[in-house]
Amino acid sequence: MKKLRLMAIRSQKDPLLRELERFGCVEFSELDESLSDEGLVHENADILSLRSTQSTLQNAIGLLDRYAPEKKPLLSAKPQVETDALLDDSGLKTVLEKAAEISGLEEKIKRLTAEENRQSSLIESVKPWMELDLPLDTASTERSAILWGSIPARIDLQSVIAAVEEASDEAELFRISGDKTTNYVLVVAIREDLPAVQDSLRHFGFTAITFPGESGTAKEAAAEAANRLNVLASEKESVRQALIAKAPERDELKLAAEVAAAKIARAEAESKLMGLDSAVVMQGWVPAEKEAALADLLEPYDCAWETEDPDPSEYPDVPVLLKNNRFSDALNMVTNMYSLPAYDGVDPNPLMAPFFILFYGLMMADMGYGLIMMIAALVAMAKIKPQKGTLSFCRLLLYGGISTFIMGALTGGFFGNALEQIGKILGKPEGWGVLPSLFNPMTDSMIVLIGSMALGLIHLNTGMVISAVEKVKKGDAASAFWEEGSLWITLVGIVLFALNKTVAPQIPAGIGKWILIIGCLMVLFGGTRGAKGFGKFTSIFGTLYNTVTGWFGDILSYSRIMALMLAGSVIATVFNTIGGIANNLVFFLIIFLIGHALNFALNLLGCYVHDLRLQCLEYFGKFYKDGGRAFAPLAVNPKYYDIPAGE
């Protein structure tokens, strides 16, 4: 990365920001607040208004997707659009008005729905009074008062009637209707005795009921509400059809949403600028390899600019952009899930890709599963034409499928032993469908286990080589010698000693023993050379413990390669055996499809997780320095469209 500083005249600010967004390789950063002492002030950017605009557009798109879902093929590529169209905001206001109109139709539907709910509630509320030929707004006459209400069904109505009569000789309670929980009653009393009657009813859970705005009987109110519901339904359907008729505007709205997103990105970058009446100042980061292209871009503008290498003290703030080829780019998603490397660290992708793909193939190890992965990846890349992260995932799936197929060929697995079982069902000779193999995880488990640990030893030592090289490059050769070098000498001693005791007795026993002793002493010295006093004594035990248990645990962790290979083969074989019990091809195919779908899904995820663990814990632990911040340039990043390749 290069640190960029730029000053441009104010009149060229907007076109310059557009060009930088098209360029997509400049990240803006906050300027030092001390510049305000020189009279510079932050630029005003109406980000909130732009976000409101984008929200309106996206809401309209969401409404069209809900009321008039877009029919797309199962696997289809996003439409492509030129960058110029995404930077042209001349028609944004017109499209925003269309979006507001769509939102207005939705609001009308909501109001009509609310009114429907009100009318439906009214019908439900008057149902208990349908047999009463009395207007709902009747509350009193010249001499009497009327109370509409309800009493819980658990209350004995006779006791309520007695209480009402005790409160007033001129009062009477009528039960109009009821259900399991409630009795609906009408109470009639003379005006003077109404307070006493109300007080007597309060003790029985009486709840007064009113029907504001209603004047006819319950039947009339229900009939009117039903008619109103029909009118509302018709009106609501009309509005819904009007909204559906807006579906052809969906593409226009999506393009406008992309334009709004591009404007928001420019506004966010603009908010980091500071300026005077006639000029603006910015700073940021640009990849070193893009510096020449940036110079060509800035040539037509009246501006002054400079770049410089970041100071080591700035490394924690320098953004990181991974640069890989087509092969190692597939592992970007793995690195991003863990953590980006520090700016002064190592890009792990080229160093991790061969091991990740090899280990994945070993864990899955089945030609049939590998074919499925390869076909799925190739079809996805051909149909949906993925970009960026999705493309990396498809490539990883493809490479993993190739590795799985090759390892399946070495182990003789094609959906387990499916061909052998089919041969038995079809009456083929013994051994028909048994594929040749270099080794079989079900019969050669110990060989697979030893091979897994040997691969782990290679994997870990590769990480140590990377660590040693990085230390030497930074001028710390002593650490490389006493840390990695001492371990290598120890490992050489262990290997020579083991060979003498097993397959190569001609190797003098003393050579391996003395190399091992020298290596152990170097490990102890390297682990304690930074300690002083009593700490040097205690660090001896810490070094011994961490070295022995750490290496033993790391190497043992690679046994998961054998475990997953064996588990996948066993599960596949079990399902094939179950399918072959009935000696019927149709039954076998049913069990085959169900069983292998489950096994494939389980292995697809399980192998990825365990492979990821080997890389992120065992491998990265030897050399990786994380904590990098992703490079986030001002760029056009469409959501609904793809930009043609080469732009």
Image: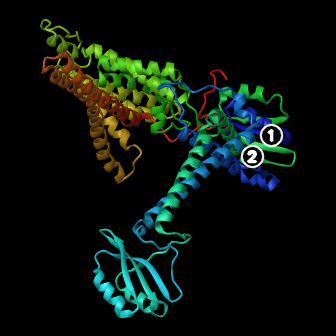
Q: Are circles 2 and 1 on residues that touch, CB within 8 Å?
A: yes
Residues 64 and 242: in front is 242
Judge whether 505 appears above or below 290 on screen. Answer: above
Classed neighbour count for the residue bearing mark 1: other residues with Cα under 10 Å, few (<14), some (14–19), many (≥20):
some
Q: Which residue is drawn at the image coordinates 64% and 43% (left, top)?
A: 57
Counting the numbered discs, the total is: 2
Judge whether 612 appears above or below 170 on screen. Answer: above
Quadrant of the frame with the N terminus? top right
The image shows residue 391 at horizontal and vertical percentages of: 51, 25
Residue 505's tag is: none
Q: Residue furthest top?
A: 429
Q: Which residue is drawn at the image coordinates 69% and 32% (left, top)?
A: 86
Residues 478 and 199: in front is 199
Residue at numbered disc 1 = 13
Quadrant of the frame with the C terminus? top right
Precedes in sequence: disc 2 or disc 1: 1
Q: Residue furthest right?
A: 278
Amino acid type shown at disc 1: Lys
Query: What's the image's color scheme?
Result: rainbow
Residue at numbered disc 2 = 273
Q: Which residue is drawn at the image coordinates 60% and 44% (left, top)?
A: 238
Q: Secondary structure at mark 1?
A: helix
Measured in 3D between alpha carbons, the distance from the residue under mark 2 to the one under mark 1, in whole angstroms, is 10 Å
Q: Is residue 534 left or right of residue 559?
A: right
Q: Which residue is drawn at the image coordinates 72% and 33% (left, top)?
A: 87
Judge whether 401 appears above or below 267 on screen. Answer: above
Amino acid type shown at disc 2: Leu
Classed neighbour count for the residue bearing mark 2: other residues with Cα under 10 Å, few (<14), some (14–19), many (≥20):
many
